[in-house]
Image: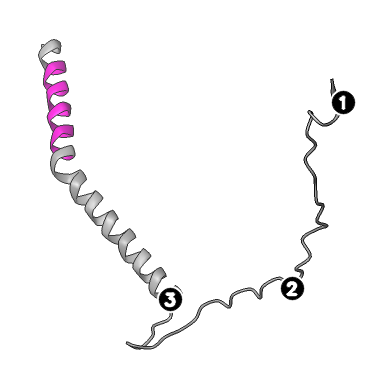
Amino acid sequence: MGLLRTLFIILLVYYGLKFIAKYILPLIITQAITKVQENLKNQYSQQQPQTKAGETSVDFAPKPPSTNQKVGEYIDFEEVDSKTNPKSK
């Protein structure tokens, strides 16, 4: 009798979890996703000010270009040909 009772409890738990996973968990997950979506939508609408259609707004000002044009000292190098220099051997 104890074996049948144990098997019945195991099957009852198995099918109960299967039912919950198939029907109840999707409902809970759907509600959680819609709640998060609404929260993100509210945060985004609070962050972005509403503008009228056709209105232009500038959110940032570009940095002025650097006035320091001095890059460095220019050095003119000359090539040395080894054929004309007898000491290079």
Label 1 sits on residue: 86
Asked whether 77 falls inside the magenta stretch, the response is: no
- Quadrant (top left/top right/bottom left/bottom right) for the N terminus: top left
Looking at the picture, which amino acid does disc 2 mark?
Thr
Label 3 sits on residue: 48
Looking at the picture, which amino acid does disc 1 mark?
Pro
- Quadrant (top left/top right/bottom left/bottom right) for the C terminus: top right
The mark found on residue 67 in the picture is 2
Q: Secondary structure at mark 1?
A: helix
Q: Nearer the viewer, residue 4 or 58?
A: 58
Q: Secondary structure at mark 3?
A: loop
Judge from the rendering whether residue 55 lies leftward or rightward of residue 12; answer left or right: right
From this viewpoint, which residue is outermost toward the right?
87
Q: Nearer the viewer, residue 2 or 50?
A: 50
Inter-mark Cα distance, 3 to 2: 35 Å
Which x, y percent locates residue 2? 15, 12
Image point (77%, 40%), residue name: 79
Q: Nearer the viewer, residue 7 or 43?
A: 43
